[in-house]
Image (spheres, rainbow, N blue to C red):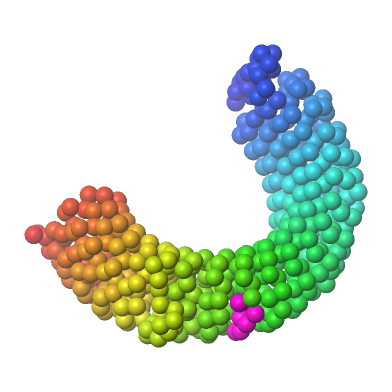
Amino acid sequence: MEKTVIQRINDNIDAHSKGDPEAVSLFLEDCGLVTVPEELTELVWIEYLSLNNNNISDIHKLEKLSNLNFLELNNNHISDLRGFDILERVEYLHLMNNQIKNLNELGNLPNLQFLALSNNQIVDIPELNNIPKIDWIFLNNNHIKSIGGVANLTSLSWLDFSDNQISDIRQFEKLQNLKELSLNNNQIYDLSGIEKLTNLERLELRKNNLRDIRKINRLTKLELLDISHNEISDINGIEKLKQLESLGLNNNNIRNIHGIEKLSRLRAIDLSDNKISNSNTLALLIELQYVNLNNNLISDIPRIAYRPNIQNLHLSNNLIDEPLRINSLYKLDNENNLQELDLSNNKICNISFLQDFKNLQSLNLSGNIIRDLRGIENLINLKKLNLSNNRINYIGQIKDMLNLTDLNLSNNQIRYLRGIENLFNLRNLNLSNNHINQLYRLENLKNIIKLDLFNNPIANNSH
């Protein structure tokens, strides 16, 4: 292994002597290094050095690399930051997945702009006044409780403190240049101070203890907001966030989504795992492309399904039983572009309403009470179709779905495979737990790579 390292170093020296501009970069990843090789210290021209995935614990030998600008030491055995002040010219420093416990020894790094310390063992953050140009800091997946040490880093534009033990964020209020802030999976229940961060464009607060989100409503430049997995029931005021394009509200206690219809730029919204029964207000959002309403209390196909820009609609685990009560005002036109529809685990028996969704490429109807497939025959663009766990006994309506690559018909009452013999593009076919006794209609399906016939009364002579 050492020969490989020495050879790479020698190759770099040779490239530099020939004036190769790529000689300023050197990659010594996955080399089993325990220390920085002595030979490396001769490469004073190196600007980009990657030592990822080794066993290095001491970096003092790098002090001679005075031109070093970009240093990667992810996945090593570094336990403290003593000696890093020798890297005065470094702008990008990657130290993810090490054993660093504190930042007290972080020396003077006047040019540092990017610092990645994710997945370490850091508990406390001292005053970090010696990195005046810092722009991005990643401290996710540590054991941090207090964030006071970054309070004066007013140059920051991106900060990630996800997966820590933070409960108080008031000291963030000085960081008014922040554009992106991630605080996922902490212990935050009070958002005091966040209202001062008026330049935020992305804010992630999923998996906290939030109930009151009114202070977020002052962050009118937000384009992405994720406050999923909290205890939120009231979203009044959210209509003030008129720049929002992506909104995550899933896994809360929301019943009423009034106000969302005013977010005219919204393209994606996740409302899954709430207590919503009426989602028709979403139909007013003409830019919406992705909607997730899984695990709610919806009893009918929402009107948003009939809007021309919608592409992905997820409605699994609701109370939909007779999806025919659509006002004629919302009938589909030729511009409809719905490509993925998930209606699994509802109470649907009649699927004739699907006949106009001609651009569908993926359809999940598993876990319903469907017997009759009439209405599905027009969906000739389908590539993935899941009809498992229903009461289907005849599948002739699928005969023209020549684009199908994935078909799941498991756990039904199918005896005959008439209609399946033309589906030459099938790659994955699940027919388990049916009443099939003859397989000759499968003989021409040469592209199948996975076929499940478990628990069928297949005759020894399938002809």
Name the spot of residue 328 as percent of width and height, x first.
41, 83
Q: Where, by quadrant of the figure, is residue 426 drawn?
A: bottom left
Question: Is residue 431 among what the camera can see?
Answer: yes
Of residues 211 and 105, the one nearer the viewer is 211
Q: On the rendered image, what quadrant is the C terminus found in? A: bottom left
Name the spot of residue 222 as percent of width and height, x first.
71, 64
Name the spot of residue 80 as percent of width and height, x first.
81, 43
Of residues 310 and 419, the one nearer the viewer is 310
The residue at the point 57 percent across, 65 percent down is: 267
The residue at the point 52 percent across, 66 percent down is: 290
The residue at the point 63 percent across, 33 percent down is: 29
Of residues 189 and 433, the one nearer the viewer is 189
Number of numbered discs:
0
Magenta stretch prevailing secondary structure: loop
Q: Describe residue 374's horizontal placement relative to residue 158 as left or right.
A: left
Q: Where, by quadrant of the figure, is residue 438 drawn?
A: bottom left
Name the spot of residue 270 as percent of width and height, x first.
57, 70
Q: Where, by quadrant of the figure, is residue 353 drawn?
A: bottom left
Q: What stretch is highlighted in magenta?
A: 254-261
Of residues 422 and 159, the one nearer the viewer is 422
- In the displayed structure, 312 sits above or below 405; it is below
Question: Is residue 363 among what the camera can see?
Answer: no
Q: Describe residue 113's horizontal placement relative to residue 368 as left or right.
A: right
Q: On the rendered image, what quadrant is the N terminus found in? A: top right
The residue at the point 26 percent across, 79 percent down is: 371
* Residue 256 highlighted magenta (yes or no): yes
* Residue 452 highlighted magenta (yes or no): no
- In the displayed structure, 98 sits above or below 262; it is above
